[in-house]
Amino acid sequence: MLSNFTPQDISCASYLTQLTWGDEMALTNDGLKDVLYEAMVRYYYRSKAFSLKMTDEDGMQGFLLAAPLSERDNSQSWLKQSLRHFECEEQDLVYDYLRYLSYNGQRVRALARPEDLLLCLFLSMKSGVGSKLLHNVEAIAQKKGVKKLYLWADATCDYEYYRKRGYSEAAHFTNNILPQLGAQETWIYSKELKELL
């Protein structure tokens, strides 16, 4: 079943995000890992109108968090509260990770207009779920008058997936912000949306 992503979905989405990308950072503190991946979801959940989830009898099978580029992160107070029990070095690691994400977002903003839509965080656990989520977000955006979609994908993502769905490469760069990740080849993709007749 397709529906809007809500704040009540953050915990489940964080768990799925950690399952998918949890080995990306060599963290031994499970509590810090939980905060890191919840911070990622909270960082990208900026618009209920454009964010969707897909569920079935087994629970959430995927989600796509999207927002106009004018919408900004509002997770900082949650993050500050959640990190207060961790050592300074551990806190710095989470903030560095978010700086890595922010750097990629800044590169997108340099190309896009504030009214364009950014596909922020996209995850699918079952075949076909991702296509349904992407198709529906594109349809919602088109109805709301969005002219262009943007996203970034690094080497941990299946960036060929977007090429097959009509997205074209708008930029390519290496992100060196986070030493623990190493140099990450990163691509920005865009897609023009046709006006509804």
Image (cartoon, grey):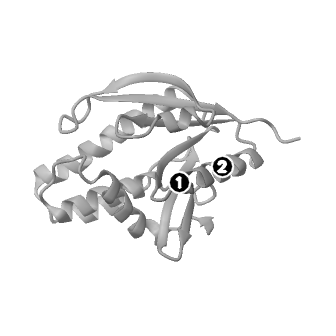
Q: The disc labelled 1 sits on which kind of residue?
A: Leu
Task: Estimate the x, y position of residue 188 in percent, counting from the top left.
Answer: 48, 30
Callout 1 secondary element = strand
Query: Looking at the rendering, in which quadrant would you find the N terminus?
Result: bottom right
Q: Residue 10 location in percent, x, y?
A: 43, 66
Q: Going 64% across and 51% down the picture, which residue do you hit?
A: 137
Q: Quadrant of residue 68?
A: top right
Badge 1 local density, few (<14 within 10 Å), some, or many (20+)?
many
Q: Outermost residue, front direction?
A: 127
Residue nearest the viewer, comparing 65 with 167? 167
Residue 59 visible at all: yes
Q: CA distance from mark 1 to mark 2?
A: 11 Å
User: Decide: marks 1, 2 in contact (CB < 8 A)?
Assistant: no
Specify few, some or many for label 2: CA neighbours under 10 Å numbering under 14, 14-19, or 20 or more: few
For image coordinates 57% across by 54% down, the residue present is 128
Instruction: Tell me how many marks there are.
Output: 2
Quadrant in the picture for the C terminus: top right
As drawn, is 195 to the left or to the right of 97? right
Between 55 and 40, the one lying in front of the other is: 55
Depth check, mark 1 against mark 2: the one in front is 2
The residue to which callout 1 is attached is: 64
Would you name the residue on which mark 2 appears?
135
Q: Residue at x 46, y 35 (%)?
A: 159
**Percent x, y of residue 38:** 34, 60
Report the residue that reaches farthest toward the bottom: 57
Determine the residue positioned at 54% across, 36% down: 162
